[in-house]
Image (cartoon, rainbow, N blue to C red):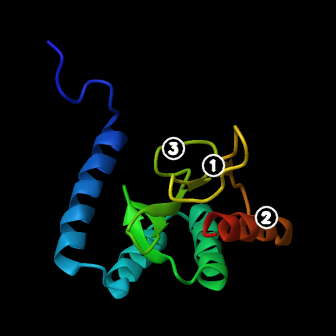
Amino acid sequence: MATKTDGLSADERAAVKQRAAELRAEAKAGKAREVGEKALLEAIAALPDDDRAIAEGIDRIVKDVAPQLFPKTWYGFPSYADANGKIVLFFKPASKFETRYPTLGFEEAAQLDDGDMWVTSFALLALTPETEKRVAEHIRKATG
């Protein structure tokens, strides 16, 4: 007999539980930037060195080019939302699901539309001057 969790890995079930906890915490805190910032920084601090270095760099870039975004976590991922609370971008560390590369992803609130097809996520192995510039450009475009 199938159970409700068939098809989800233990890591995926943990992410769903983490999201439920995030929603409860957000409901208590409202739209307090400080609460989201604290959760985001705690999530980044808990990452292994390679993932943490990239997440810290993304956080720095977001603060520089899109300070209007609200920091928060989303399924445990360091994320940034618009004024309506919609996720614009997130960082999925390779360590989260033991994948071979971390991902910088953009959600529907990101304004990246480009004709009939556009990129919504990037594998991001390292932040170099070149990749930082590209990340900043995508974040600027995503936030209009």
**The C terminus lies in which quarter of the figure?**
bottom right
**The N terminus lies in which quarter of the figure?**
top left
- In the picture of the structure, the residue carrying the numbered disc 2 is 134
- In the picture of the structure, the residue carrying the numbered disc 3 is 98
Between discs 1 and 3, the one toward the N terminus: 3
3 relative to 56 in the view: left or right: left
Q: Position of residue 64 (x, y in %)?
A: 65, 84
Residue at the farthest top position: 1
Does the rendering let one see residue 22? yes
Residue at the farthest left position: 1
Residue at 29% across / 47% down in the picture? 16
Crowd tier of the residue under label 3, counting other residues whose Cα lies within 10 Å: few below 14, some 14–19, many 20 or above: few
Between discs 3 and 2, the one toward the N terminus: 3
User: At label 1, which amino acid type do we have?
Assistant: Ser
Please name whichever residue, 56 or 83, is drawn nearer the observer in this view of the structure.
83
- In the picture of the structure, the residue carrying the numbered disc 1 is 121
Q: Identify the secondary structure beneath mark 1.
A: strand
Task: Tell me how far mark 1 sits from mark 3, CA to CA.
Answer: 17 Å
Q: Position of residue 105 (x, y in %)?
A: 58, 53
Residue at 69% across / 55% down in the picture? 124
